[in-house]
Amino acid sequence: MNYKNVRQLKMILGIGLLGVLTMLKPTPCRAQAEIDPDHYDAVENEPVPQAKPTIAVSQKAGNFRGRFTLPFDIDYAGLTLSQGS
């Protein structure tokens, strides 16, 4: 190998090594400050009223033809479906 080829090889290896080191360098992370933080001291501490169920209990069953198993009890709109099938 002559001097010119060795010089080009060293330059390519140096640029490649610099590229790899640049990719492996961790990027800095900085936390973002809030511009307008929430003001919780201005909120009144009143309890939130519970929502009423809007589905009628006497609603007809759907047209489902299949089997399923419930992993736990379900209580919804005044109806309770027990665990199992």
Image (spheres, helix red, strand yellow):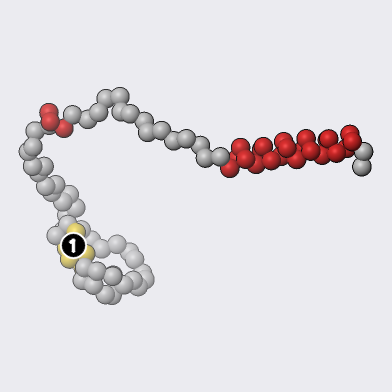
In the image, farthest residue toward the left:
46
Q: Pinpoint residue 65: horizontal percent, then vertical percent.
A: 36, 69
The residue tagged 1 is 75
What is the quadrant of the N terminus in the image? top right
In this rendering, the answer to whether 69 lies above or below 34 is below
Crowding around mark 1 (Cα neighbors within 10 Å: few <14, some 14 to 19, many 20+) is: few
In the image, farthest residue toward the right:
2
Q: Residue at x 19, y 53 (%)?
A: 55
Front residue (pair 35, 72): 35
Q: Is residue 44 visible?
A: yes
Front residue (pair 47, 10): 10
Callout 1 secondary element: strand
Q: Pinpoint residue 42: horizontal percent, then vertical percent.
A: 12, 28
* Residue 67, quarter of picture: bottom left
Is residue 56 left or right of 16 when viewed as pictured? left
Is residue 68 left or right of 78 when viewed as pictured? right
Front residue (pair 36, 32): 32
Q: Amino acid at mark 1?
A: Asp
Q: Pinpoint residue 45: horizontal percent, then vertical percent.
A: 8, 37
In the image, farthest residue toward the top:
35
Q: Residue at x 28, y 75 (%)?
A: 85
Number of numbered discs: 1
Q: Residue at x 69, y 40 (%)?
A: 17
* Residue 6, quarter of picture: top right
Q: Residue at x 26, y 75 (%)?
A: 84
